[in-house]
Amino acid sequence: MEESYSVGTGYGRVRLPFPKEQIRSEILCHGLGAHLMYPETRTVLDIGGQDTKSIQVDKDGIVVNFQMNDRCAAGCGRYLGYNADEMNIGVHELGPIAMESTKNIRINSTCTVFAGAELRDRLAMGDKRSDILAGLHRSIILRAMSIISRSGGISDQFTFTGGVAKNEAAVKELRKLVKENYGDVQININPDSIYTGALGAAEFARREGEAA
Amino acid sequence: MTLSVGVDLGTGAVKTALFRVEDGKTEWLARRNDKIRQRDPFKLADDALASVLKDAGLEQDDIQYIATTGDGENIQFSTGHFYSMTTHARGAVFLEPEARSLLDVGALHGRAVKMDERGKVLGYRMTSQCASGSGQFLENIARYLGIAQSEIGELSQQADDPEIVSTICAVLAETDVINMVSRGISAPNIIKGIHLAMAGRLAKLLRVIKASGGVTLVTGGLALDDGLIATLQENVGEQKIKVSVKSHPDSPYAGAIGAALWGVYRYEKLAAQGRFKKAS
């Protein structure tokens, strides 16, 4: 008979009906998941709705260092989501609209709520929606870059995961800044990147099964 | 006799106050408080000026000084601009003569100011960089809970077991609140939790400016939130900050009042020296 093993992870992990040994932090799972998708990965950036994580992993996908921002929405996906609400557009529209930008606009506010107010002022001043949105994308990626640098910078290869990895404008900005700061680095973005954490958890479960 | 209008252009609302000062007697003739709600604030300021003039039966030419404050620097009809700290301090002393410090809680900021009995600013500290503890924060949560702003104060005072929000970020707190709702926490306990977080942050500002003695008047739009005032009173008591926190029904106008009164002062000073030039 086949045996099955499971491991739970993520924000809601404590609510899963799993014993404690079968729970892993999402940092560990993201590191391992990214390693399975791209075995040469050494740095993982995950921008989710509520936090941004930069994880350094070794050749086996084991986490050696990480930094995260989960006290403030600046630099998280919610930053973009909040401003999408302010503009009355859907999150999926953000990237495509921002890609139409022709002018550089700098968003000065760190705080998400202040950025929302700045956005209203800018719209009232006659700035274009696409240019403002591009500025917001730049701002979230700049924040991510600072988290990356605090975690130890980028080593080749670099894997970008999380919901924001689906946003073309954010990816464009990230590619640009990575090249400026770390030179030519292989950047991996998997279309299934939202499953990275789950994949890592599944691998932990598989190893558990093997060890048993 | 000097007639002066104060216009306080805030992030959430435009407040306008028209004053007449004659032989040391100060009279508040007309007022307006307009929520901006995504409208053009400069247009609102224009309309508000026209409206207070009409209420007082005056023409714009009758007015000696139009003073702006807040973000009102670029208002077309402004004679002069005053910083928010000075106008709120002056306005607070006008509303509450015992006030020696104030907490201005607006849509996007919190600010503590210490002043003397004439409204001269002695020190201040404000929140920056972060909207935690601001009015917008509370407004977002209320909107999510489906509560009208006027109900917030009363609900907060019904709390029996306030739920503490785990984050200081106004945006992430929304997620926190969503989780609270799904865990079945009552609206009063959620609102009170938010009030506690805000009060903690505001009381810290009071401590930094070393407010001590007299009344701390709460000004700005949030001054009308009884729940926040009650929570602030509890909080400064617990922290042994020796002030008595009060609000005033006209607290939201503090900036506009202060601007109008400083306008009168500046006009009379300059006119006495024959140096007053009316803006074209």
Image (cartoon, coloured by chain):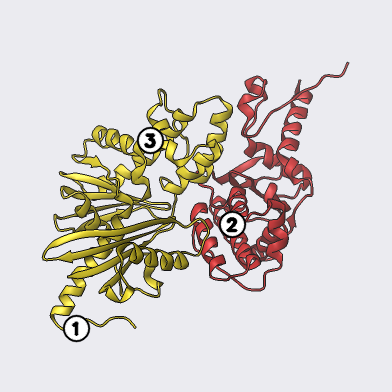
Mark 3 or 2: the one toward you: 3
The mark closer to the camera, 1 or 3, is 1
Residue occupying the far top of the picture: A1
Query: Residue B178: horizontal and vertical position, in percent?
Result: 57, 34
Q: Kindly identify which residue carries mark 2.
A: A140
In-image side of B223 versus B108 (left or right)? left
Rounded to the nearest whole Å, what is the CA distance between mark 3 and mark 2? 30 Å
**Is residue A125 visible from the viewing direction of this image?**
yes
Q: Chain of mark 2?
A: A
Disc 1 chain ID: B
Question: What residue lies at 42% left-to-right and 47% top-to-bottom?
Answer: B135
Spatial CA distance of label 1 from label 3 is: 50 Å
Chain B display color: yellow
Q: Colour of chain A?
A: red
* Amino acid type at image mark 3: Leu
Answer left or right for B188 relative to B18: right
Q: Does dot 3 land on a helix, a strand or a loop?
A: helix
Q: Is residue A185 visible?
A: no
Q: Amino acid at mark 1?
A: Arg
Q: Quadrant of the N terminus of chain B?
A: bottom left
Q: Chain of mark 3?
A: B
The vertical placement of A41 against B241, above or below, is: below
Residue B207 location, quadrant: top left
Is disc 2 on the same chain as disc 3?
no
Marks 2 and 3: in contact by CB < 8 Å?
no
The structure residue drawn at horizontal position 45% and vertical position 28%, both measured from the top left corner, is B189
- Front-lying residue, B92 or A168: B92
Looking at the picture, tell me which residue is in the foreground, B131 or B4. B4
Residue marked by disc 3: B196
- Neighbour tally class for label 1: few under 14, some 14-19, many 20 plus, Cα within 10 Å: few
> Which of the numbered marks, if any, corresponds to residue B275?
1
Q: Residue furthest right?
A: A1
